[in-house]
Amino acid sequence: MALLGLSLVAAACGSDDGGDQASSVTVDQDVNSAVNNGSDSAESTTSTTAAAEPQSMEEWEELWAAERAAIVAEIEENGWGTSADGTTATGPAGFTIDLTACPAGWSNTEGLTDTSVKIGQAIAQSGTFADYNNYARGIQAVFEYYGDQGAFTDSLGKTRTIDYIARDDGYDPARTIPLVDELLDSERAFAIWTLGSPSTLKVYDKLNQRCVPHPTPMTAHPAWGDPVNHPWTTAPAATSYSTEAILWGNFIEERIDEFGDEVTVAALVMNNDFGKVYDQTFRAYLEQSDLLRDRVTFVAETIEAQAPTVKDPMTTLAAEQPDVFIAMLAATPCTQVITEAAENGMKETTPYLFQPLTCAGLNFISKEKLGGDGMAGDGWWILNPGTKDLQDEAQHDDPFVEWSRELLESKGIDPDSSSLLGNGVGTFGWTAAQALMIAGELDGGLNRSNFIVAQRSMEMTNPYMLPGIRLHMEGNDDAYFVEGGVFQQFDAAVQTWVTKSEPIELDGKSQNCNFDPAAGACIPY
């Protein structure tokens, strides 16, 4: 499978029309060659990982304890962590934070008491993105569980629970800014989470300038992979939007002979920083591809994030009679495009219809969401970023899925109400909980800089990831927790996403991204 290097991504982010910057992009030939030849550097662990995966929660907890111990040992053996004089934090591959550069009055333990850790969250609880508040509900459940177990006991003997404060910004950057200010200055949170590319781009500079941990934002924009310039922000356990767009392009290349001499690809793009990453990366891929450059016509329509309907732009795109349709969006429109494609004929005439990774799981495509027999969703494709799904009955025997469902039910939450609950539990909550435990075991106990070093040093087996997908971060060398996924196609008759590819594992391939907001482009390093 061919793959472009992230030099492509840098230029792809840069212009609204995919013009001069996209055409100047070159292909990372080493990555391209490696993936074309089976990617010797990528770990192909599908069968062995599946066989070795723990079969009970007791086995999972034993594995995680061993993995945490190994991470702590590596940090201690290399002299990483927070220096004894509190002036420096260091981690793998040259990762360094000068703590003396933090603002006057900054405290490495702000947000901590002897019994609690205050973590703030700006998230959509209203509007078209309101379903993503289920991330917060899942996170809260995990934090409460581990807190009740006494898991957050640090090397100084302090046992804490998590005071998790989630507040509504409606997926509106204008609301996110004052909300984050409140979490910083009034709540004095130890760490702050954010949702969405537009909102996060507005506040991540400030969070880094204030030396406040900004763990795994709920957005897969490539900008979060910037350990040198934004060391306090750590990318989430999800494939970046830019990598996803590259893989869409490669998917089409591999099937180009199925089409005629002229191929039309249509996309509905969310008109913000999130949608722009998809759009410009995909345009750049087309422009540099020898197979696609002269054969593919790319047509796109845009929608606003809070648009009540997608009917008009979907009708316009259907008139183009596309061979491939890609939804470059998130939230409620994910369901709406499926319904509109069924109504305007695109479902019957377009061979390949793609949902984005932001809408993985049954949440946006189930018959309960689509209505009727649910067959409108049959045959749609997706690049799943490597996650399981609490709603999928075929996965209910998985030990972690079963445990997560029971945990949510014990909190009075219906686990079938949203696939995003599972991401809250496994993708975000579990990862943060493990990092807090690791940080607490380091010299000096739990503090802000130890929390960041713990994340930058993590290599663990996330129970919510599909076998073959690795959770790994390594200081300045690898700033992305997850780089890969699997292609899946929806089977509406049995209401499940059916895996159609081997795991695509690109761990360590993505270049770091120093994002230039003025140019809207990554400067790779």
Image (tube, grey):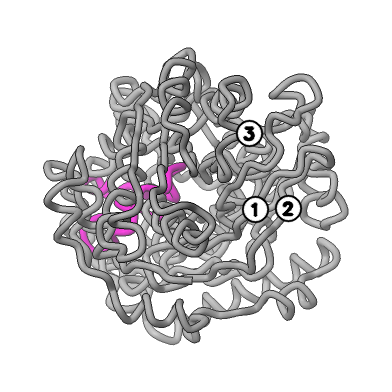
**Measured from the top left, where is residue 401 in percent x and y?**
78, 50
Q: Residue 307 or 483: which is nearer the viewer? A: 307
Residue occupying the point 60% across, 60% down: 486
Query: How many numbered circles does the render carry?
Result: 3
- In the rendered image, residue 502, in percent from the top left (x then y), is placed at 64, 69
Alpha-carbon neighbours of circle 2 within 10 Å: few (<14), some, or many (≥20)? some
Tell me how far mark 3 sits from mark 2, CA to CA: 20 Å
Residue that appears at 31% across and 26% down:
173
Work out which quarter of the rendered image holds the C terminus and state it: bottom left
- Residue 221, magenta (yes or no): yes
Residue name at image x 22 percent, y 64 percent: 524
Instruction: Tell me residue 331's x, y (percent).
Output: 52, 29
Tell me the quarter of the picture where residue 54 sits: bottom right
- The residue wearing badge 2 is 498
Q: Given the image, on which type of amino acid does mark 3 rest?
A: Glu
Left or right? Give the position of 441 relative to 227: right
**Chain-order first, disc 3 or disc 1:** 3
Chain part drawn in magenta: 208-235
Q: Horizontal and vertical percent for residue 315?
A: 46, 20
Would you name the residue on which mark 3 appears? Answer: 348
Q: Which of marks 3 and 1 is in front?
A: 3
Q: Is the magenta stretch mostly helix, strand or loop?
A: loop
Q: What element carries label 1?
A: strand
The residue type indicated by label 2 comes to: Val
